[in-house]
Image (cartoon, grey):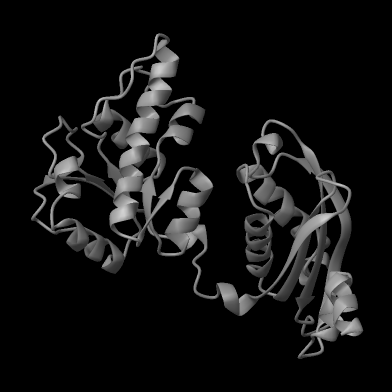
């Protein structure tokens, strides 16, 4: 038990040595401390804290003479780039999510076999809080690279469609489709509260719109509500049926339609262009759509 406790708190390099199945080379990045904004608690929002990274990567040895050529090895830079790349993508709540994505980036390198990723918060209390994960390249073997992912189909579901028996059939079709599917929904029919300030009203209207995304997810567990480009890209690569929660992308974008009154067709078509969609399909909707949007009835289950 003493050895198990020691190993549990040992450096990932020692853990890698104790759990090895094959004799593999290792590279490591130790005690990399970066200041970032991360965390699910309200006290962690709008402020930065120190995060410490320890990463060990087991790699297949190069088959042949190295000739002192950096291009023939998995460079330390690939590890630090994976960390910095994920931190630059989006603000995250969980260290677990960050560790998973860092491991996935590292293990996309051909030589990488297994990765030990430990991330710790240094400023959240008298002790050090952290997570550690171990992942193998096989864990991500079925995940496509983003550049290999087909352009998605954006499917707008009207309120009428959400309330019919055809909804499950549309989700079935999305699950079986060869392209990633991203669902968008209409604004609820319920009236929202009125704000005195136009920008406050815009945010209220966006949040009201997002409620329907959660309604859809509540009616079919295969649909996952996502609000960031990083999550949308991840969903496309992992064959997840995503439901777009519009607030963050619209509020953060510099080129989104700026009308304070939400014009749903315009915003959905903008979103389709942002995602470089293969097609936009409006299901059961009598809204005024552009010429590039295919309109179908709720009972026409066709993607």
- Which residue is at 89% across, 56% downward? 31
Q: Is residue 55 above or below residue 88?
A: below
Q: Is residue 182 visible from the viewing direction of this image?
A: no
Image location (x, y in percent) of residue 165: 13, 58
Q: Looking at the picture, how far across and down is residue 157, in whole percent?
A: 22, 46
Residue at image location 38% in from the left, 29% down from the top: 206
**Location of residue 205 (image quadrant):** top left
Q: Is residue 175 visible?
A: yes
Where's the N terminus, which quadrant?
Answer: bottom right
Which of the 4 quarters of the picture holds residue 75?
Answer: bottom right
- Name the foreground residue: 42 vs 12: 42
Tell whether 140 sits left or right of 103: left
Question: Which residue is the extreme one toward the top?
Answer: 196
Q: Hey, which quadrant is residue 28 in on the image?
A: bottom right
Q: Is residue 189 left or right of residue 2?
A: left
Could you say where residue 299 lies in the image, as x and y percent from the top left? 8, 55
């Amino acid at each position: 038990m003493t050895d198990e406790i020691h190993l549990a708190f040992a450096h990932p390099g020692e853990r890698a040595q104790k759990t090895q199945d094959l004799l593999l080379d290792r590279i490591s990045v130790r005690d990399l401390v970066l200041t970032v904004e991360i965390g699910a608690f309200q006290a962690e929002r709008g402020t930065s804290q120190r995060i410490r990274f320890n990463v060990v990567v087991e790699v297949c040895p190069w088959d042949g003479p190295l000739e002192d050529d950096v291009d023939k090895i998995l460079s330390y830079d690939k590890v630090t780039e994976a960390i910095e790349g994920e931190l630059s993508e989006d603000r995250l709540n969980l260290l677990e999510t960050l560790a998973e994505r860092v491991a996935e980036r590292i293990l996309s390198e051909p030589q990488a076999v297994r990765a030990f990723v430990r991330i710790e918060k240094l400023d959240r209390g008298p002790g050090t809080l952290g997570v550690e994960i171990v992942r193998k390249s096989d864990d991500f073997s079925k995940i496509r690279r983003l550049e290999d992912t087909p352009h998605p189909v954006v499917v707008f579901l009207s309120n009428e469609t959400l309330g019919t028996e055809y909804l499950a059939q549309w989700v079935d079709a999305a699950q079986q489709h060869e392209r990633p599917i991203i669902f968008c929904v209409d604004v609820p029919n319920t009236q929202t509260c009125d704000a005195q300030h136009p920008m406050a009203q815009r945010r209220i209207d966006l949040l009201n719109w997002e409620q329907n995304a959660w309604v859809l997810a509540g009616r079919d567990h295969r649909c996952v509500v996502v609000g960031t480009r990083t999550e949308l890209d991840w969903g496309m690569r992992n064959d997840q049926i995503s439901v777009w929660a519009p607030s963050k992308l619209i509020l953060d974008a510099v080129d989104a339609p700026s009308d304070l009154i939400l014009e749903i067709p315009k915003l959905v078509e903008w979103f389709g262009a942002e995602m470089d969609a293969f097609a936009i399909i409006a299901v059961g909707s009598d809204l005024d759509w552009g010429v590039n949007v295919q309109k179908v009835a709720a009972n026409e289950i066709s993607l």
